[in-house]
Image (cartoon, rainbow, N blue to C red):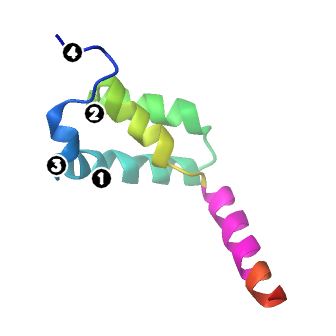
Amino acid sequence: MKSKYESPFYFYGPYIREKLLKPARDIRRILLCGYPKFATIRFVADHFQLNVEERHILTRIIVPPERIVSRISKKVAYRHKV
């Protein structure tokens, strides 16, 4: 019997990317409107009926747009210093 923390077999195949691509795009669009990250992920995950592992993956890979801009600007600033 699997524990609730073990990932199913399909997480290691291309299936997971195909399944999470559309929800990730929807989350990105909603975040651009200014909604909070975790509420948005919960809303979209409920809509797509994602399980706990899939929700966790989305929580880990989704980055709000303002954080992306901040990281890119830091990376560019660092390159100019060197």
Does label 3 or label 1 sit earlier along the sequence?
3
Q: How many marks?
A: 4
Task: Name which quarter of the figure residue 79 lies in.
Answer: bottom right
- What whole-number distance in Å separates the C-alpha atoms at marks 3 and 4? 19 Å
At 80% across and 89% down in the image, what residue appears? 82
CA separation in Å, label 4 and label 2: 24 Å
**3D distance between C-alphas at marks 3 and 2:** 19 Å
Residue at position x 57%, y 54% in the image: 32
Going from the N terminus, do you reach mark 4 or mark 2 first?
A: 4
C-alpha separation, residue under disc 1 versus residue under disc 4: 26 Å
**Magenta highlight on residue 50:** no
Sequence-earlier tag: 1 or 4: 4
In the rendered structure, which amino acid carries the disc numbered 3?
A: Gly
- Judging depth in this view, the residue of 29 and 1 nearest the camera is 1
Name the residue beneath numbered marker 3: 13
Residue range of the region highlighted in magenta in the rendering? 65-76
Kind of residue indicated by mark 2: Phe
Q: Please report whichever mark, 3 or 4, sits nearer to the chain's N-terminal start.
A: 4
Q: Which residue does the numbered mark 2 point to in the structure image? A: 48
Give how far apart the Cα atoms at labels 3 and 1 are: 14 Å
Identify residue for label 4.
Answer: 2
| Residue 16: x %, y % from top left | 22, 45
Furthest toward the top, the residue is 1
Label 2: few (<14), some or many (≥20) within 10 Å?
A: few
The crowd level at tag 3 (other Cα within 10 Å; few <14, some 14-19, many 20+) is few
